[in-house]
């Protein structure tokens, strides 16, 4: 990640505390474990987990001709299994928080209500991430851990491209909203953009 992007994200998160970078490769189980160990050693608990991994907006292929062993498996590993493994690793620390939050950064491309032909590996993995969000929210409802999926919209990142209509700060606002939900009645198991519900 470039320093410019770090700075943009720090700006978006201004006002909610200090932001410290931590190296983490969600496709590498040992990297996840090392990150969890570092947080456990330094802080002993975790208040907010944001799963922002996402690759392969695969517009160059269709479901019919998709490279299952290449693009599809790589996308599943990063977009679905990565966040799943990260949640498993960090849940013990989240349970030590008084009011923890998990935010899975998804996409309206993963909405079954809106889905049609499109980037197959990306769409399917984001739909699966939404299903994981619902499953975790149900399991953790009584643990005071709110779990939600957020679509940041079409954002001017490396994946979104320079022509995307939303800045990094604009895309991050909905994520920050979900990460800082109030303790009294904040939603869980939802799918949102800019704090407003999206259709599953």
Image (cartoon, grey):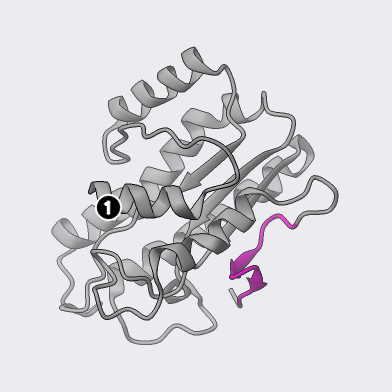
Question: As rendered, which of 112 and 9 lies closer to the eye?
Answer: 9
Where, quadrant-wise, is the C terminus in this rendering? bottom right
Task: Point out residue 192 in the picture as x, y percentages from the top left corner.
Answer: 60, 68
Query: Does residue 16 sit above or below 56 in this rendering?
Result: above
> Does dot 1 land on a helix, a strand or a loop?
helix
Task: Point out residue 1 in the picture as x, y percentages from the top left corner.
Answer: 24, 47
- When asked about the image quadrant of residue 32, the answer is top left
At a point 36% along the width and 31% down the height, the residue shown is 22
Question: As rendered, which of 147 and 41 lies closer to the eye?
Answer: 41
Q: Is residue 95 left or right of residue 81?
A: right
At a point 46% along the width and 60% down the height, the residue shown is 128
Query: Does residue 152 sit above or below 144 in this rendering?
Result: below
Question: As rendered, which of 120 and 177 lies closer to the eye?
Answer: 177
Q: In this view, does 101 lie to the left or right of 114?
A: right
At a point 54% along the width and 62% down the height, the residue shown is 173
- When asked about the image quadrant of residue 196, the answer is bottom right
Give the class, few, some or many, for how many residues have Cα within 10 Å of label 1's Cα (few <14, many ≥20). few
Q: In this view, does 35 lie to the left or right of 50?
A: left
Task: Point out residue 130 in the picture as x, y percentages from the top left corner.
Answer: 52, 61
The residue that label 1 is drawn on is 4
- Tell me the magenta residue range: 187-198
- Residue 194 within the magenta-colored segment of the rendering: yes
At a point 48% along the width and 60% down the height, the residue shown is 172
Residue 140 visible in this rendered orientation of the protein: yes
Residue 1 visible in this rendered orientation of the protein: no
């Amino acid at each position: 990640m470039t320093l410019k992007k770090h700075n943009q994200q720090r700006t978006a998160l201004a006002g909610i505390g200090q932001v410290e970078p931590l190296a983490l490769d969600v496709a590498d189980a040992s990297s996840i474990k090392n990150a969890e160990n570092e947080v456990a050693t330094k802080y002993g608990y975790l208040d907010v987990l944001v799963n922002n991994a996402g690759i392969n907006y695969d517009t160059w292929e269709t479901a019919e001709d998709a490279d299952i062993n290449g693009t599809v498996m790589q996308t599943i590993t990063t977009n679905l299994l990565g966040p799943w493994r990260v949640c498993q690793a960090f849940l013990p620390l989240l349970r030590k928080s008084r009011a923890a939050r998990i935010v899975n950064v998804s996409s309206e491309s993963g909405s079954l209500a809106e889905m049609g032909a499109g980037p197959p590996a990306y769409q399917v993995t984001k739909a699966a991430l939404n299903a994981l969000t619902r499953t975790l929210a149900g399991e953790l409802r009584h643990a005071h851990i709110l779990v939600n999926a957020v679509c940041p919209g079409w954002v001017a990142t490396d994946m979104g491209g320079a022509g995307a209509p939303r800045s990094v700060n604009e895309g991050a606002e909905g994520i920050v909203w979900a990460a800082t939900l109030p303790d009294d009645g904040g939603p869980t198991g939802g799918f949102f953009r800019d704090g407003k519900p999206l259709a599953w």
